[in-house]
Amino acid sequence: MRVLGLDFGSKTVGVAVSDPTGTLARGLEIIRRKQETHLRSTMRRIGELCAEYGAQALVLGYPLNMDDSEGERARKTKAFGDMLKQKFSLPVYYCDERLTTVEAEEIMEAVGIRKDEYGKHVDRIAAAVILQDWLDNDRDSDIYRRER
């Protein structure tokens, strides 16, 4: 089963895809928009990627606060997840994304990407980290919920 992983931000969405066996994640691209509320082209591109890769589910990074509480960013992410479910009729799973940006930066440093180039890659790599975490862990565990 192929799955798309998404790292939803205020002006970007990092995108990753699993291999056909649902074992490995790789970063695909970063979808950029000028304003946070302008999601039409973002949704169109996600639809194109779902079709291109035959995605059967979406995994959305869920930005909990360090104390496990849900803040404004989590609420916006949930609203985005609701839009995805409605538009694409695919299951949407949420994966705790705390510290994924830190992990993405560590990966970029390890592979020799210059710090002034991080912005060109970080959301795509963070999406891959989120998706790989979901693929590696028990997908039925209570931290990976279809509904929040």
Image: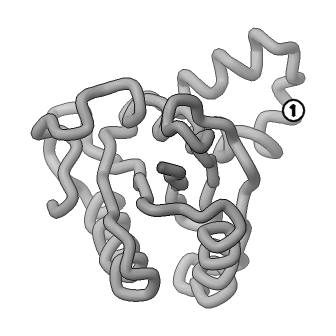
Q: Secondary structure at mark 1?
A: helix
Query: Is residue 5 something one can see in this rendering?
Result: no
Q: Amino acid at mark 1?
A: Asp
In the image shown, does 129 or 105 lie closer to the viewer?
129
Q: Is residue 64 visible?
A: yes
Above/below status of 14 relative to 92: above
Residue 121 lies in quadrant: top right
- Which residue is disc 1 drawn over? 116
Coloured how?
A: one colour
* Residue 129 % position (x, y): 53, 32
Q: Nearer the viewer, residue 20 or 60?
A: 20
Using a 10 Å C-alpha cutoff, classify the residue at mark 1 as few (fewer than 14 neighbours), some (14 to 19) or many (20 or more).
few
Image coordinates for residue 51, horizontal then vertical, percent:
64, 73
Image quadrant containing the C terminus: bottom left
- Count the labels in the image: 1
x then y, percent, for residue 109: 76, 15
| Image height of 48 relative to 129, above or below | below
- Residue visible at 63% across and 54% down in the picture: 15
Q: Residue at x 54, y 62 (%)?
A: 55
Q: Residue at x 87, y 32 (%)?
A: 116
Q: Nearer the viewer, residue 42 or 64?
A: 42
Q: Is residue 126 left or right of residue 115?
A: left
Task: Tell me if residue 60 comes above or below residue 112 in the rendering.
Answer: below
| Left/right of residue 26 with respect to residue 22 in the rendered view | right
- Residue at screen point 66% across, 24% down: 105
- Picture coordinates of residue 115 (x, y %)? 82, 25
